[in-house]
Image (cartoon, grey):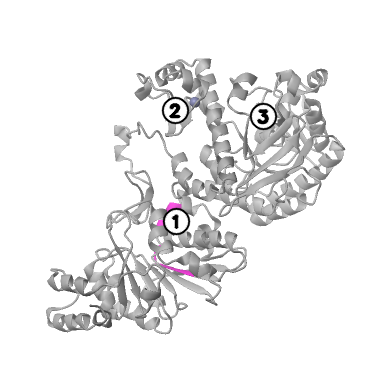
Amino acid sequence: MDFRLDCESIGSRARAAVFQTMHGAVETPIFMPVGTQATVKAQTVTSLAETGARLLLANTYHLLLRPGPDVFNKFGGIHRFMNWSGPVLTDSGGFQIFSLRHARAMEEAGARFKSYVDGTTHLLSPESSIEMQHAIASDIMMVLDQCISSKAPHDQAQAAMELTHRWAVRALAAHGNSPAALFGIVQGGCHHDLRKASAEFLRELPFDGFAIGGLAVGETHAERYDLTEWATEHLSAHLPRYLMGVGTPIDLLEAVHRGVDMFDCIIPTQLAQRGVAFTSHGRLQLRRSVHKFIEEPVDAACDCRCCRAYSRAYLHHLIKSDEVLGWHLLGMHNLAFYNRLMQEMRGQILAGNFAAYYRQKRGELMRVDADNPTRPPKKNKAVQPPRMGDYELHRSAQGFYSIRQISSGEIMHSVSAPSDEADRLYIQQSALAARLVDPDRAGELVIWDVGLGAATNAMAAVHCFELCQRENRTKMRPLRLISFEHDLDPLTLASKYAGCFAHLRHRAPSAILTHGRWQDDSELMQWELLKGDFRDFIDTAALPDVIFYDPFSYKTDAALWSAGIFAQIFSRCLAKATELYTYSASTAVRVTLLDAGFFVAQGVGTGPKSETTIAFNRAESASQHPLRPPLLDQKWLARWRRSAAKFPGNIGKDKQLHFADRIEGHRQFSHSV
Ligand SMILES: [Zn+2]
């Protein structure tokens, strides 16, 4: 296929490539519209070409039953038959056979099934599948595989994978020296060891590319993203990778980020039939009556024929009336949106910009009709958000999700998107990336993550580590992340709704929930959970370099902001330079830290908070910190003297004088002007 890698991203596995077919070159990443019956539903080849479609997919199983191989033999293949001059990829029929369930029998020879056209029995074998694809004369062919449910237990998944491997060898033999390309298919269900074994087995065979099969069949998004990345990691870098049957625009972005080159899915045309349009301002439902009088096009930023010529009102009318033209026009628009998205991703990869683009685009692609957000109907008002224990899912007015404690009403990371706050407050401010790749600082870096919550801060650290590792493979310091939490309900709840929490689409959080620990493939990063009361672990947990201090507020959990706990942390860390980062900038918290012996500095602001707090246990640490955070100075002290909330709540009147003396006499202030 003469596969050429044009560019690999930094900070992402995304890549841009080009390969040759008998009907011309194909640039990746690419989306393939699905032409099940040798037609993409409600489109002509001319309209398809107008949307920017380059490579079509056709289904061997359906075409085998009707019109049958004789018709393709007569026409010399699908290109002349359907009047499409670009390249075509055919699947093997394995997935359709899988969907038949009751009308099939799997055996070593192949899959026996009953035709839905005339009731006759057929055997689809690795050889007959290839023979049919040769009759269709597609440019890229797929081996027959045994697809199974993503819920299949290990032994069943392994048996199906091994059968798929034997069939792959037979398909290669049947393919002979045909000039068409042939792809192997990685199987293995939701089992990492099997997916790895499958990729490693297939990549030794002379295939022209590889598909990742058996996904998008019931697993969660998080599992799919994870298994996709796992598979691409174990496939050859110098051949195309195709994720079968995926997906929505956000799925494509996530998979390209994980190293996939090719996609097919019925979603753009199927949802068009139901009145759904993907646009630059979110997903629209044209059936909604808000569009009845709207003269604007579906997407003013789109130059497709639908958007150039027709109003939303007209599309609304066509969809309401079940007119085929509505399906045709919205299908065109959706395909144009998909193809433009793929081209945009390719452009960003080539420009070396994909990692930043990915972070920005993710939010954009998850939006729903930004202009006319739906208000929940009245009867739904009583419907409660999903709950677990004392926690519930909370959607902010800006559309991002957090976890709220029901009893206190407190929202974790309430001020901005949770991942953004975690990144700004804890990761960037602690200069974590620089610490991880600093060759002068030998030994393990230890982080305490106090208040695991929905793992937002911990996963921000995991992502930072992975990003650094991709860019600086050889110079990394080992990272040990220790999370402290007594209640796992927030993380369990958020994991159930991982679609709302991008940071949880990763293997690590589920490993923490199941096993209490996780390590990355390089074994350089260890993450462990210490479940229980933080105070019980302070004296035994490995000494930290950095502490992310993010429990609920003083109002909700006073014990974790007490003088006692900060004094305990301070004396525990005497042997090491330690920095504590926290979101609180309250006077009470700051004086409590000072009184415990810390040197206290102003941290960056986040959202509506104009500042946060950093505490050091060494006098010189603030001036050596890369961001040079300003230590609280005499001016702050003067304000404190006048403050009405001068003393932490638990200081009795008789102790206030002594307390004030200790603060006034703190070394931090004797150095200031
Ligand atoms: Zn359009």
Query: Dot 3 corresponds to which residue?
Result: 56
- Upstream in the sequence, badge 1 or badge 2? 2
**How far is mark 3 from mark 1, CA to CA?**
41 Å
Q: Residue at x 53, y 48 (%)?
A: 353
Q: Which residues are magenta?
A: 481-495
Q: Is residue 211 magenta?
A: no
Residue pictured at 73% horizontal, 21% vertical: 66
Left or right: residue 573 versus residue 214 is: left
Callout 3 crowding tier (Cα within 10 Å): few <14, some 14–19, many ≥20: many
**Residue 285 % position (x, y):** 43, 28
Q: Secondary structure at mark 3?
A: strand
Could you say where residue 484 lies in the image, as x and y percent from the top left? Answer: 42, 69
Q: Quadrant of residue 314?
A: top left
Instruction: Please say whether residue 118 is visible from this viewpoint.
Output: no
Q: Position of residue 362 (x, y in %)?
A: 47, 44
Q: Is residue 338 above or below residue 155?
A: above
Identify the residue position indicated by label 2 in the image.
299
Locate the C terminus by quadrant.
bottom left
636 lies left or right of 193: left
Amino acid type, label 1: Thr
First in residue order: circle 3 vs circle 1: 3
Task: Choose mark 3 or mark 2, whichever is in front.
Answer: 2
Question: Is 492 covered by the magenta stretch?
Answer: yes
Q: What whole-number distance in Å separates the C-alpha atoms at marks 1 and 2?
A: 38 Å
Q: Circle 1 sits on which residue?
A: 492
Q: Amino acid at mark 2?
A: Asp
